[in-house]
Amino acid sequence: MMCYPPYNPAKFLQNGVAMTVYTAFWGKRYWESTVSQPEPPYHKTILMGGQGVPIFTWVAIPENAHSTIIATYGITGELDQEWSLRLLGRKAYSQGYAVVLFDWRAHGKTAELSPTLTSDGLYEGEDFVRLAAAAAAMGCPRKFWFMGFSLGGQLALWGIKTAAELTQGNENLGIEYSDIGGGAVICPSLDSLRSLTYLTKDRFGRLIEASIVRELKKLAWRIHDAHPGTIDPQAIERTNTIWDFDHELVIERLGFPSVEAYYKASSALQLLPELQKPTLIIYAADDPLFHPDIVPELKAACKQNSALDLLLTRYGGHVGYLSSKECQSQAQDPDPWWAWNRILQWLEHQNTAVV
């Protein structure tokens, strides 16, 4: 395990809720002024994911690219508005990585292309692998690194697991298992069942959930309008919680008898012992969206699997990780985006270690 500079935020952000809320609002407004790298010249295209689902994708390949990052965002969003993902794209492209960013199932332009709903990793894992194969055919260099944050982190972990199964079968994907480098995730969702119960225990959590549900309903209406007859409008109307969304719209299509069974099946915590590729997990002990009981289990799983590097911090909130000026100076970072900087530092170490 590498030695990383410690993470410290400004005093007023040494609280998970404050960090989460502040970063979301501040980052959305100011992120472009914090980085010197320009937006990569993305080629916007449609690539084929698992089960023939078309995936809307941004691809940028710098001259003399050495490897490729494939990444997506959290529970709601779309590429144009996902500033944190675009920030990664700028930083990675400037360091010689080909970058593949995508709207995952039922999100953004992918929702307009297909009525296929989310599966929290069960099928999105295959999407990551298929996108890697399609990107290789476009000229993106191998090794492929799967990334995401929040629920997108869970999807990326499924991608790493699925790569072992898909590339070792008889199917000719156009890539081998050795072409998959591994992955890196920030504040991944690891146990939806426990965390959703935990999230709704207080007013802040209920406000966060209400905000997410508004976006999920917009997403469902978008699919309803783009693909008439595929979603029951009354089911959308009945959705008032994340649990409702999965109960009304998702589980029946996936063949699950209950939301509980679906969350247990898609949970990423159970995948950790199976991952065989180098994987970095950045996780904050004060993440207000996830049950704190997950932390010791995450530590134990990473201790038992040498492929996993866990960077567990005292502060950071949920996908916050804004660093103080002092922290930036200590880490020799060019900007306040501590988590992305650690991921790129870790990747550089992985790439040199392989050579």
Image: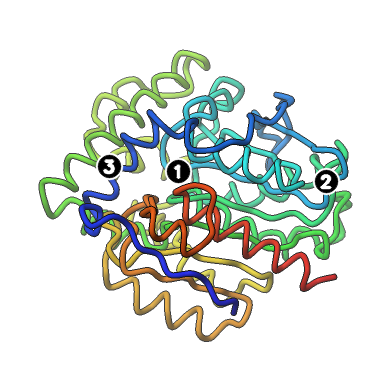
For label 1, the residue is 74
Residue at 41 percent of width and 57 percent of height: 189
- Pointers 3 and 2 in contact (CB under 8 A)? no
- Going from N to C along the chain, the mark reached first, 3 or 1, is 3
**Which residue, given by chain and number where applicable, does mark 3 sit on?**
22
User: How many C-alpha atoms fall within 10 Å of the one at disc 1: few (<14), some, or many (≥20)?
Assistant: many
CA distance separating discs 3 and 2:
35 Å
At which x and y percent is residue 70? 67, 46
Residue in front for this viewpoint, 242 or 297: 297
Q: Secondary structure at mark 2?
A: loop
Residue 295 lies in quadrant: bottom left
Q: Residue at x 41, y 26 (%)?
A: 219
Under tag 1, what secondary structure? loop
Q: Taking 165 as reference, is 183 left or right?
A: left
Q: Nearer the viewer, residue 170 or 191?
A: 191
State the residue position of label 2: 65
